[in-house]
Image (cartoon, grey):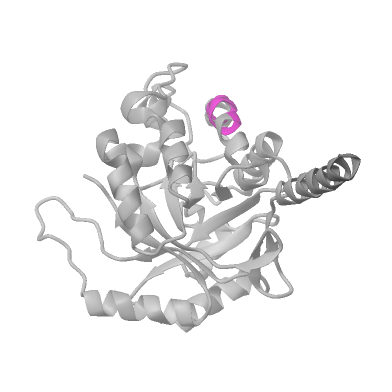
Amino acid sequence: MGLWLYILMIFLGGLQFQQGTAAVRTFSIDYKNNCFLKDGNKFRYISGSIHYFRIPPAYWKDRLLKMYMSGLNAVQIYVPWNYHEPLPGIYKFSGDRNLEGFLDLVAQLGLLVILRPGPYICAEWDMGGLPSWLLAEPNIILRTSDPGFLQAVNKWLSVLLPKIKPRLYQNGGNIISIQVENEYGSYYACDYDYMRHLLAVFRLYLGKEVVLFTTDGVKESDLQCGTLQDLYSTVDFGSEINVTQAFEQQRLVEPRGPLVNSEYYTGWLDYWGEPHSTKSTTVVTNGLQKILELGANVNMYMFQGGT
């Protein structure tokens, strides 16, 4: 009896050690080998964008399951500020706006998340996700270090980011990386102090370990104004762009690290009164194939757009 108890104690001790080891979760950038590392192993994501705010909650699981069955290992998600704070200090995170419920559902289906919380998201969404009530201040300068704008941003992020932190990959969740702002290099202001402020706020609430990144077009001017030290720089481009040349532009600002196309355009938006925009399936798939052959990470924008 004593021998069996001894063997059981050894077994349980080993099991506890294994569980303790498995609990150490990491997601990082390997600059030496030009890749991401997930739990210390080389990792490449193949992702698709989905807009939960354009899809009724009853269809969330169906759409996500179809994305999973398509072979994706991650989804990319915007968070529209004006959808969750329609009036100053009035926050809505239930029903159609149940962001946490949506993120939990993504996790249940075994998909990782690249989160894009803005504060500006574009997304062909009203004011790019910025609340219209910001304009009640006549002299406010959006997407800059204007004190009035930063005050509103700080308050919003103090509500949103604490909801995100427990869902980070290193904290047991499935969010592997987070974008700061969105294609800021395309904006006229080119306010580095604004971007530095956002970086500091994101680090304050999310910690030092999470991978933070920016996304910009492949023009040198976009990359000049949209990138910032300590934010990993990624690019976006569609099937009409030479893939090799596009990633050469990323290498101008990120000489080492993984190649990333954060928005590979599978289609394009419709303009009011103009013919429906379409793209050749062959052209889109050929471009995707070239991206994959280079070992790059890719997110298809859009994959499931909703309405």
Which quadrant of the rendered structure holds the N terminus?
A: top right
Left or right: where 300 falls relative to 218: left
Q: In the rendered view, tell whether residue 22 sits above or below residue 219.
A: above
What x and y, as percent, mark residue 21?
A: 76, 51
Dominant SS in magenta: helix
What x and y, as percent, mark residue 73?
A: 46, 59
Let me know if residue 158 is in the magenta part: yes
Q: Residue furthest front?
A: 1
Left or right: where 174 falls relative to 83: right
Which quadrant of the rendered structure holds the C terminus?
A: top left
Residue sitting nearer the eye, 174 or 239: 174
Q: In the rendered view, tell whether residue 288 sits above or below residue 130.
A: below
- Residue 125 visible to an observer of this rendering: no
Residue in view at x 66 percent, y 38 percent: 206
Disc tally is 0
Magenta-colored span: 155-162
Residue in view at x 71 percent, y 70 percent: 31
What x and y, as percent, mark residue 303?
A: 32, 58
Residue sitting nearer the eye, 24 or 223: 24
Residue sitting nearer the eye, 219 or 60: 60
Let me know if residue 106 is in the magenta part: no
What x and y, as percent, mark residue 4?
A: 84, 44
Residue in view at x 39 percent, y 29 percent: 98
- Residue 89 visible to an observer of this rendering: yes
Q: In the rendered view, tell whether residue 27 sits above or below residue 161.
A: below
In which quarter of the view is residue 263 placed? bottom left
In which quarter of the view is residue 299 placed? bottom left
In which quarter of the view is residue 234 placed? bottom right
